[in-house]
Image (cartoon, rainbow, N blue to C red):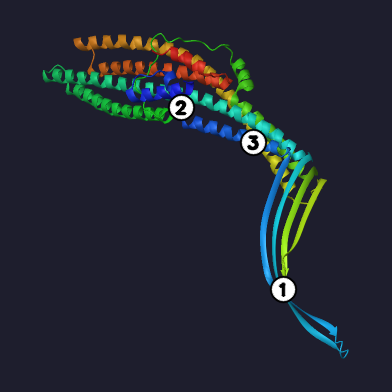
Amino acid sequence: MNNFLKVLLFSFILIDNGSAASLLDVYEQALVNDPRIKEAFANKEAIIEAKPQARSFILPQLSGSASFSDTDSDGRSTFQQKIINPINGEEVVITNNTDFLQESETLQWDVTLRQAIFDYGSWMNLRKANKTVAQAEIDYLAAEQDLIIRVANAYFNVLAAEDTLEAEQAARQAIEKQLDQAQKRFDVGLIAITDVQEAQAAYDQSIANEITSKRNLATAKESLRAITDSYPGQLNKPDNNLPLIMPNPQSESDWVETSLEQNLSYLSAQVGVEIAKSEIKVQRSGHLPTIGIQASKRDIDTDSFRSDSGSEFTPADNENINEGVGVQLNLPLYSGGQVTSRVRQAVARHRASKEKLERVARETTRIARDSYLGVISGIATVKALQQSVKSSATALQATEAGYEVGTRTTVDVLDARRRLYSSQKNLAISKYDYLKNILQLKQAAGTLTQSDLEQINNWLK
């Protein structure tokens, strides 16, 4: 069983039983079901055909044709003739009528061979096609990297939405208990009605937040389904032992330099400049002569039968064979300014391709720097939020203890609980952002592969 069938079978099993899925499992589903990567592959296959099409113009061209005709004709021919009467010597005009019947069959065939000897435009078009094919290969590799990023982003967005929903549900349940306690304390006269109202307002807000979180989770799952064609079940997520690894090398300029050497979008733009340059040569060739050799052979075989005035059929066969070899020179003189216009158009597109290259270079530099800083800041953020969760948990315990003895209010407890849940949610999201930035940094550098996804997958439990 080849790899494609294995992945396809796995996708059906995962869809049917709704089992848990790892990041790598989801990526393998996307390889089979993502329309965008399929579209990229089909476009690559179509563009590759530009090379044999361009090569065909410099290879021999052989053509042939044949025809057969069967013609029947009958009629009467009338003509006058002057003769001398032998009796009186006078000139007499007599009329002759002749009936005729004619049948003929004609078989014709010809074969022509053409071979270009000098065609500068065709050679330049072949060079352009080679570059176009190279660009198509690069663009498809970029589409594969883009699939990794899209899968990872959609996967972690689902996890982030799940964590947010869990935090909002936990907050609602805790606030509901707080509201119940506040109501009981108010009933016995231990607290004022304002504490109950504060708890009620917080509870109502928590319900609204939970509804919003459910919608965001549904949207995140739908985004992932658009890639994999199946709704995700339980997804693996990073635990507390997530490795926090600094980029290697730890130099922003080194990553930028690597990006300007290997980034696939930048390489594609570079090839695009070369393609545009070749197009100028192709269009300028419209002013140049072309030389070709042509060899042909034609055979016309006609069989005919004729009968006049009921006489026997008289056969008449005719066969004509023509053979020839020659050299043909085509010299364009004036095309109404079309060639000159196309040259100007190609020059303008070449200029546009160079501007695009500069734009992609700047964008690549920006993404490389931003992703590098994103990884570094992500590590610091995860560490800070880990400490924030511990501090928020301790603060909540202290606030609840103070509330029990009457030194803290319901509002204090609610605020402390919100800070704890917010810290827990932000910690989870910071881990996902850190993992995303790792992949985006490698994509910017042009080194992103499936093995990078497998490494992150091993960090998920």
Q: Quadrant of residue 52?
A: top right
Residue at 75% in and 40% down: 121
Q: Quadrant of residue 230?
A: top left
On the picture, is 430 further left or further right than 114?
Answer: left
Residue at 52% in and 11% down: 246
Name the residue carrying label 3.
50
Q: Earlier in the sequence, mark 2 or mark 1?
A: 2
Name the residue carrying label 2.
32
On the picture, is 435 further left or further right than 411?
Answer: right
Q: Rate crowding at label 3 as few (under 14), some (14 to 19) or many (20 or more) other CA atoms within 10 Å.
A: some
* Residue most extreme to the left: 188
Q: Nearer the viewer, residue 76 or 227?
A: 76
Residue 288 appears at what percent x and percent y? Answer: 80, 43
Residue 405 appears at what percent x and percent y? Answer: 19, 9
Residue at 44% in and 12% down: 458
Q: Which SS class for mark 1?
A: loop
Looking at the picture, does residue 280 appear above or below residue 450? below
Residue 105 appears at what percent x and percent y? Answer: 69, 58
Q: Amino acid at mark 1?
A: Ser
* Residue most extreme to the bottom: 88
- Residue 374 seen anywhere in this rendered image of the structure: no
Name the residue carrying label 1.
309
Q: Amino acid at mark 2?
A: Val
Q: Rate crowding at label 2 as few (under 14), some (14 to 19) or many (20 or more) other CA atoms within 10 Å.
A: some
| Tag 3 near tag 2, CB within 8 Å | no
Q: Earlier in the sequence, mark 3 or mark 2?
A: 2
Q: Which SS class for mark 2?
A: helix
Q: CA distance from mark 3 to mark 1?
A: 66 Å
